[in-house]
Image (cartoon, grey):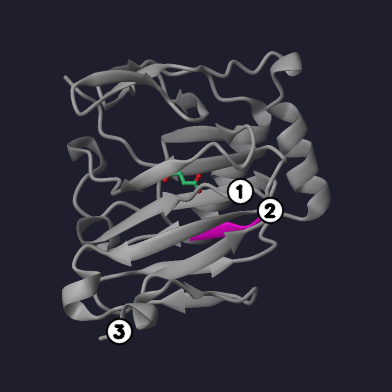
Amino acid sequence: MPVSRLKPQLVGRNNFSFTQQQADLSFQPGFLTVADADRLNDSLDDSRGFAWRHDDIVMFGRSIAQPRLTAWVADPGITYRYSGLTLTPAQWTSELSRLRQRLQDELSAPFNSVLLNLYRDGNDTMGWHRDNEPELGDNPVIASVSLGQSRYFDVRHRCYRDLEIAPLRFELHHGDLLVMAGQTQQHWQHRVPRQRSQSGCRINLSFRYTARRD
Ligand SMILES: O=C(O)CCC(=O)C(=O)O
């Protein structure tokens, strides 16, 4: 297959679900009204006491600053470990609790934690990866809400070249919801690519159920 046929296919801005080739994705643009998304965004400002972290992570044996800021909010005792880091949970704010409740009600899935990523501008990124830490289980439901600057979000099958499946590209805007469920995290990777043209700040909240580590 010509490489051009494997270029990411841009998904439009209508409700969209994709349940093929071991993926289970559903996209709801405008899940939050602009007013609700603005309120939530404001509540996550460090001037309002929300504590963003800028940790180093270990990649290929080297310690590097993450190309974004992060925060981990979860029920007591639910820690998150990745790339040599262990995050202990901050407390749920009233805005985050309200959103968690709405997601639980609408998706019929429990969420006891949310990982927040803050991309300061289009140079901040997240590389290709899967959310496949053992504490998430085999088929986690990851509910991802975006705020602020729109950014691309790409997903591709781990064997997309061999299987000749073009990656999908979403453009995630303020208030959009993308849910990844089923076997997606076993077979598909995702990333937020660099987009130098995007100068604004973006926050992503990915709600998940994280098993307690003993
Ligand atoms: O920023 C995003 O939309 C994705 C974040 C992400 O990939 C993750 O938290 O695992």
* Residue at image mark 3: 2
Q: Which residues are magenta?
A: 174-178
Residue density around tag 1, few if under 14, some if 14–19, many if 20 or more, within 10 Å:
many
Q: Position of residue 49 (x, y in %)?
A: 69, 13
Q: Residue at x 16, y 75 (%)?
A: 162
Question: What residue do we see at 68% from left, 53% from top?
Answer: 175
Mark with earlier residue (2, 3): 3
Marks 2 and 1 close (CB-CB < 8 Å): yes
Query: Label 3: few (<14), some or many (≥20) within 10 Å?
Result: few
Which residue appears farthest toward the right when viewing the image?
A: 35
Residue wearing tag 1: 146
| Cβ of mark 1 under 8 A from ligand 1 | yes
Using the numbered discs, state the Cα–Cα distance from disc 2 to disc 1 in whole angstroms: 6 Å
Helix, strand or loop under label 3: loop
Q: Considering the numbered disc 2 on the image, is that residue within a helix, a strand or a loop?
A: loop
> Where is 56 relative to 29, above or below?
above
On the image, the x and y values in percent for residue 92 come to 56, 25
Image depth: mark 2 or mark 3 in front: 3
Q: Are marks 2 and 3 in contact (CB under 8 Å)?
A: no
What is the C-alpha distance between the residues marked 2 and 3? 36 Å
Q: Is mark 2 within 8 Å of ligand 1?
A: no
> Can residue 77 be seen here?
no
Q: What label does residue 175 carry, if any?
A: 2
Which of these two is toward me, 67 or 117?
67
Q: Looking at the picture, which amino acid does disc 3 mark?
A: Pro
How many residues crowd mark 2 within 10 Å: few (<14), some (14–19), many (20+)?
many
Q: Position of residue 128 (x, y in %)?
A: 33, 49
The amino acid sitting under disc 2 is: Gly
Q: Residue at x 44, y 60 (%)?
A: 154
Task: Name the mark nearer the viewer: 3 or 1.
Answer: 3
Looking at the rendered image, the quarter that the N terminus falls into is: bottom left
